[in-house]
Image: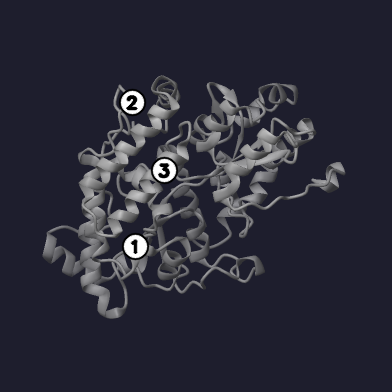
Amino acid sequence: WEQETGCKIKVVEVPTSEMFTKIMQEYRANTGAYDALNVIPAWMPDLAQAGALEQLDSYVDKYGYRGELQTIAATYRDNQMTVDGKIYGFPDDGDVFLMYYRKDIFARDDLKKAYKEKFGRDLAVPTTWEQFIEVGQFLTDALKSEGVYGASMFREPGYGNFMFQERFRNEGGKFFDANMKATINGPEGLKVFNDWLTENKFMPAGVEKFGFVENLAVFVKGESAMTISWPPYGRFAAGYLANEEALAWVPKTQIADKVGYALPPGGHPELAAGFALSVASTSKNKEAAYLFIQWLNSEEISNERVQLPYALRDPFRDSHFTNPGYMALWPDAKDYLAALGDAAQTGLLDLSLIQTDKYEEALRQGISRLWAGDDPQAILDKIAADWDAVTEKVGVDKQRAVYESWAAKSGAYPN
């Protein structure tokens, strides 16, 4: 960018957990400290309604960019760019959960024979959560003596928040009723919590505390047969450019060329977190900031960026999923991209409301209590009560309008 334009970019590094607060603090202080912003799409209604984000439609039209926006995969284009039909950001990261599984384990003749004898059907990658529990327990029973568990997951509450949102909706749950009363404590939510407790019994000890890196380490060391995570797991498990200095924190893979890719059970994976590129409304360089994010989002540059092993930016344009250069990066990269392309068709949006994080924090606290041994139904009832309190504080009618706008998007609930 600097070579092409002469404009220098100063990158301000902020932990993800502090980004929303920093953006809002700068906006209220009107310092103009930030020009271009990375925002999590679920924050957009909050930030846009507060006035912290610049509306981008006039810039898009001025620079003739609408056509290129249409080649962004529909899930990201239709769900992660707009608030009330106005553009406030460009997708920058195709975050979505995939299932990663050990092809070699599922191909073992001894396991296939034993599974068929026990259950009367073929051993296969699970497509429902009932199958996941059955297969996961079977593989743990069969392989634990070899140091392998049927599955592992990140269960730490910050990650569990996304996992719950995905599974709750795949079970048929809706977050609110017509009166904006939380329904998270219904039978769908209870099933998710109870299933989690069942699953943990065939996963590694301490799985309740697993975060991104802990779960990654177990999987790439070959100690679990299945897991679910963001797209970087696929690249890390393949060992793609594993010797990059910026990836020194990534555990070394022992399962390269042994990993398969599939949609998680239920078929509707979470578009968990993700990032969009926006312009700060208080920027003193709005046009330059806009042109910078347009350049980053463009077909040419984004295709380069999603192939950088250390950028943690995942495919989000139609061309990313069919890029011959990307397909050649490791032997199974074509299958990896095909699975990501499928996930982009059926992915589910994170819940996005005013004060979204307060709803998520109540859920995170509830998951912590679940791992502490509290009663699942009582936990869910408390979460629902906390959600209702946030809704009342925001204003029921105001929040209902935001929720209905979100719920009308194609990725809010399974079709």
Residue hosting label 2? 180
**Above or below 225: residue 38:** above
Q: In which quarter of the image is residue 21?
A: top right
Q: Quadrant of the N terminus?
A: top right
Relative depth, front residue between 216 and 386: 386
**Above or below 33: residue 129:** below
**Above or below 247: residue 277:** above
As drawn, the residue found furthest toward the bottom would be: 145
User: Which of the two labelled residues, at mark 3 and mark 2, occupies the earlier sequence position?
Assistant: 2
Residue type at mark 3?
Answer: Glu
Relative depth, front residue between 273 and 126: 273
Instruction: Give the percent coordinates (x, y) of residue 314.
Output: 55, 49
**Mark 3: few, some, or many residues within 10 Å (few <14, many ≥20)?**
many
Instruction: Give the percent coordinates (x, y) of residue 224.
Output: 35, 68
- At a point 54% along the width and 46% down the height, the residue shown is 321
- At a point 50% along the width and 47% down the height, the residue shown is 95
Residue hosting label 1? 208
What is the distance, in whole Å, between disc 1 and disc 2 at their CAs?
Answer: 31 Å
Q: In which quarter of the image is residue 50?
A: top right
Identify the mark at residue 133; answer none if there is no mark. Answer: none
Could you tell whether 363 is left or right of 71 in the image? Answer: left
Instruction: Give the percent coordinates (x, y) of residue 229.
Output: 43, 55
